[in-house]
Image (tube, rainbow, N blue to C red):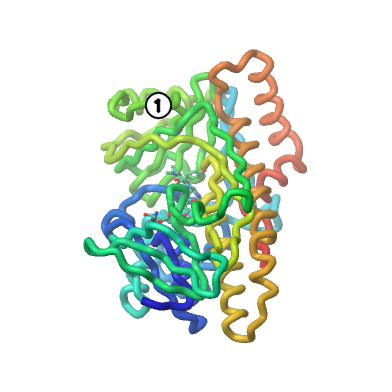
Amino acid sequence: MRTTVGIIGGGPAGLLLARLLHRAGVDCVVLERRTREYVERRQRAGMLEQGTVNALREAGAAERLDAEGLVHQGIELRFDRERHHIDFPGLTGGRTVTIYAQTEIVKDLVALQLADGPPLLFEAAALAVEGPRSEAPVVRFLHQGRERTLTCDWVAGCDGFHGVSRRAFPAGTCRSYAHEYPYSWLGVMAEVPPSCEELIYARGDRGFALHSMRSPSVSRFYLQVPNGTDPGDWADSRVWDELDARFAIDADWTLRRGPITAKSVTAMRSHVHEPMRHGRLLLAGDAAHIVPPTGAKGLNLAVSDIRVLARALTALHRTGESQLLDTYSELCLQRVWQATRFSDDMTRMLHAQPNGDAFDHRMQLARLRRVIASRHAAAELAANYAGLPLPV
Ligand code: RFL
Ligand code: PHB
């Protein structure tokens, strides 16, 4: 097989790139290791910045998002048994965020791709990217029991944190920066209407808790748990009791309970791979960087990389202009480091430190109090959460 852009990975990054390239008349092929059912069910992000919503509109993939997405005007911070609203439009000059599940974005993009898009092969696992510095890099992949090759002008590595693309950077051409946090998240899906209008980020001595949602009838929760936690140790009643304890405030508020349909544990880590380009191989999304989910930035960063990459490849295809492609890595990494910093700040401010002392505890509370007391501090949080300006 031969194509202009070989895309490894059919997550949100790879699928969105394929859509944008297809609309611009650039041909491409997407290779996805898993089945369609698997990628459409994998539970992940839910909070979209305005720039992400706009990018999905540009790709012609926002019909259901516009009908079903829940627009939020801010978030709630809870600590010391108090609740505080952070008003995004008031603090950012009118910006909002939207709740729409990553699974739904993936379903929408897959449906469009299979209807009229370039090829999307499921159960096609890339094994290696060969000759990234040559004029025609090759992706070796396994499909239907046979090893095959895809020869490309460009390869987009959109294969997530556990993908193979990063490995094609020879030693000495790249550097990784990584940090593991000493706690994980237990994610829980429940068939019960949300008990709040906005997301609740709660800090307490028992640990962090987040109340999110998927729709007016489905709630999503996360609990800080020790690394290595087995979700099997968390019976439904234990989950509800712990959520009750962590969200408790002095005001009148009750958490609605309902059937729990899924539980899973996610490690919290930051990882940035520099640079994001080696010859004709370009990394995007989780393949290049991951952040802890406390700032809701991972999917949004993947989409902002893809906007730059789609524009850069389209410009090259249409006019031969390579300037945007030449600055791709630098442009994206500036935003990546800012999102990594914000995600790290939110994570450290809101989680109970497993071996933290009384001083650490006071520092967290002082940070939270500052956000509440100072319009500048609140505006800084809101600007980062709602999304810093896009690179292009
Ligand atoms: P993905 O989604 O991991 O997709 C990569 C795809 O590549 C495939 N693949 C391969 N295909 C072919 N050959 C190979 N060798 C391959 N190896 C892998 C995989 O099967 C997969 O389909 O990466 P992408 O597209 O870069 O998208 C990134 C986002 O998925 C991720 O950043 C977010 O989910 C992070 N995230 C959040 N981001 C937000 O912006 N807002 C949120 O509210 C938010 N919440 C979250 C999150 C991530 C979480 N977890 C589980 C880590 C909440 C959680 C709990
Ligand atoms: C989610 O809805 O899954 C979600 C929302 C906000 C976060 C993380 C996850 O910070």
Q: Quadrant of residue 266?
A: top left
Q: Identify the residue at image location x=71%, y=57%.
A: 93
Q: Quadrant of residue 315?
A: bottom right
Residue that sits furthest to the top in the current view: 358
Q: Identify the residue at image location x=46%, y=74%.
A: 152
Q: Position of residue 214 (x, y in %)?
A: 39, 50
- Taking depth in this image into account, of 81 and 173 the one nearest to the observer is 173
Count of numbered circles in the view: 1
Q: Is residue 391 left or right of residue 296?
A: right
Q: Is residue 256 visible?
A: yes
Q: Amino acid at mark 1?
A: Gly
Q: Position of residue 281 (x, y in %)?
A: 54, 64
Image quarter hosting the N terminus: bottom left
Q: Quadrant of residue 341?
A: top right
Q: Identify the residue at image location x=60%, y=57%.
A: 276
Q: Position of residue 346 (x, y in %)?
A: 61, 37
Q: Which residue is mark 1?
A: 228
Q: Is residue 149 above or below residue 82?
A: below
Q: Position of residue 52 (x, y in %)?
A: 54, 62
- Taking depth in this image into account, of 309 and 197 the one nearest to the observer is 309
Q: Identify the residue at image location x=32%, y=77%.
A: 115
Q: Is residue 20 visible?
A: no
